[in-house]
Amino acid sequence: MIDIQLLSTPLSISACETFVESPEAGGAVVFIGTVRNKTANKAVVRLEFEAYTPMAIREMEKIAQTALDKFAVSKISIHHHVGILNIGELPVVIAVSAPHRGAAFDACEFCIDSLKQTVPIWKKEIFEDGEVWVAAHP
């Protein structure tokens, strides 16, 4: 089972954890992306995320389905934020449950790595003295 959401409201770690709960799961792995205060020794003020929503959702569904097919996992939840985020806020939460922990770790890592490479979500880093778009995907 898959839960994919692209949200302009704050992300809920517990919503992702709750979705992946399963009696067959021996464990769950959760990745929580957090806005940090520095990039390359430069102070970050905030981040802004934009997405091509229909394609972003389809691509996240594809990533989750690939992870389900490739790894022995039960459920996957991927939530990503769009809009403005301040330091300490959450741009992405990924939760994966599986009968065994190794598969959950592997699938979670696959999901975040694939998301960063293929999902059309763009991030703008805002600094005190300027801004830059980073990680622009197709």
Image (tube, grey):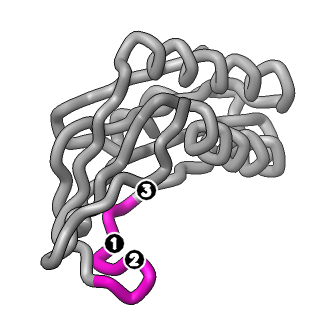
Real-space Cα separation, disc 1 to disc 2, in angstroms = 8 Å
Q: Residue 100: image x %, image y %?
A: 81, 43
Few, some or many residues within 10 Å of mark 1 (<14, 14–19, 20+): some
Q: Which mark is residue 33?
A: 3
Q: Are marks 1 and 2 in contact (CB under 8 Å)?
A: yes
- Residue at the extreme bottom of the image, as rendered: 41
- Image quadrant of residue 20? top right
Foreground mark, 1 or 2? 2
The correct choice, above or below, for 136 with respect to 64 in the image is below
| Depth order, front residue of 127/70 | 127
Residue 19 falls left or right of residue 80: right
- Image quadrant of residue 61? top right
Q: Residue at x 36, y 61 (%)?
A: 34
Q: Residue 74: image x %, image y %?
A: 70, 25
Element marked by disc 2: strand
Q: Residue at x 37, y 21 (%)?
A: 52
Q: Is residue 37 magenta?
A: yes
Residue 99 falls left or right of residue 23: right
Q: Which residue is mark 1?
A: 36
Q: Which mark is residue 39?
A: 2
| Depth order, front residue of 54/23 | 54
Few, some or many residues within 10 Å of mark 3 (<14, 14–19, 20+): some
